[in-house]
Image (cartoon, rainbow, N blue to C red):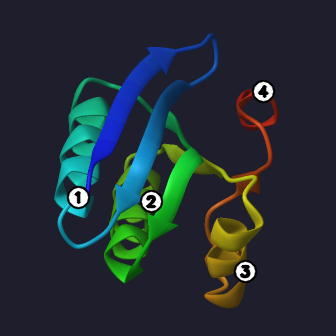
Amino acid sequence: MELNLTTRTSASATVLTAAGEIDIHTAPDLRARLDELERSGARTIVVDLSGVDFLDSSALGTLVGVNKDLQANGGVLKVVCAKPSILRVFEITRLSEVIPVFDTVERACA
């Protein structure tokens, strides 16, 4: 199980692109990178899950925790998710009501 994380900055947000699987083994890597971005001053973070093939509850827990931390500091977390199977997880858990979900990075950064 592998997770690749890359970061870029746009005019309006810091975009963290994830590719691979986010599970109990790789969620700590995602959390560490998101915490690093927040510590470096990022206030709008877009997590692009377009390249993610699988995620479990530890991934969702990571996103919820980061969302709470960012909101407490005046920031916002957004998620990009276009794969129906991954999007369904956000809908079933109603996490899409807590964290804004977009179909493209461009829309999330707009």
Image-quadrant location for residue 35? top left
Tell me if label 3 and label 1 are in contact, CB under 8 Å: no
Tell me if label 3 and label 2 are in contact, CB under 8 Å: no
Disc number placed over residue 26 in the picture, else none: 1
Q: In 3D space, how far apart are the residues under numbered discs 1 and 4 (Cα atoms)? A: 26 Å
Q: In 3D space, how far apart are the residues under numbered discs 4 and 2 (Cα atoms)? A: 20 Å
Q: Which residue is mark 2?
A: 67
Q: Where's residue 72, x and y in %?
A: 39, 56
Whether residue 18 is situated above or below residue 31 in the rendered picture:
above
Q: Nearer the viewer, residue 82 or 78?
A: 82
**For marks 2 and 1 on the same chain, the one whose residue lies earlier in the sequence:** 1
Please identify, in this view, whether the residue under mark 1 or under mark 4 is nearer the observer. Answer: 1
Please identify, in this view, whether the residue under mark 4 or under mark 2 is nearer the observer. Answer: 4
Q: Secondary structure at mark 3?
A: helix
Task: Tell me which amino acid carries mark 3.
Answer: Glu
**For marks 1 and 4 on the same chain, the one whose residue lies earlier in the sequence:** 1
Task: Tell me which amino acid carries mark 1.
Answer: Thr
Task: Tell me which amino acid carries mark 2.
Answer: Asn
Q: In 3D space, how far apart are the residues under numbered discs 3 and 2 (Cα atoms)? A: 17 Å
Tell me if label 2 and label 1 are in contact, CB under 8 Å: no
At horizontal 61% and vertical 51% (from top left) the residue drawn is: 79
Q: Residue furthest front?
A: 1
Q: Which residue is mark 4?
A: 106
**For marks 3 and 2 on the same chain, the one whose residue lies earlier in the sequence:** 2
Q: Which residue is mark 3?
A: 91
**For marks 4 and 2 on the same chain, the one whose residue lies earlier in the sequence:** 2
**For marks 3 and 1 on the same chain, the one whose residue lies earlier in the sequence:** 1
Q: Where's residue 1, x and y in %?
A: 25, 58
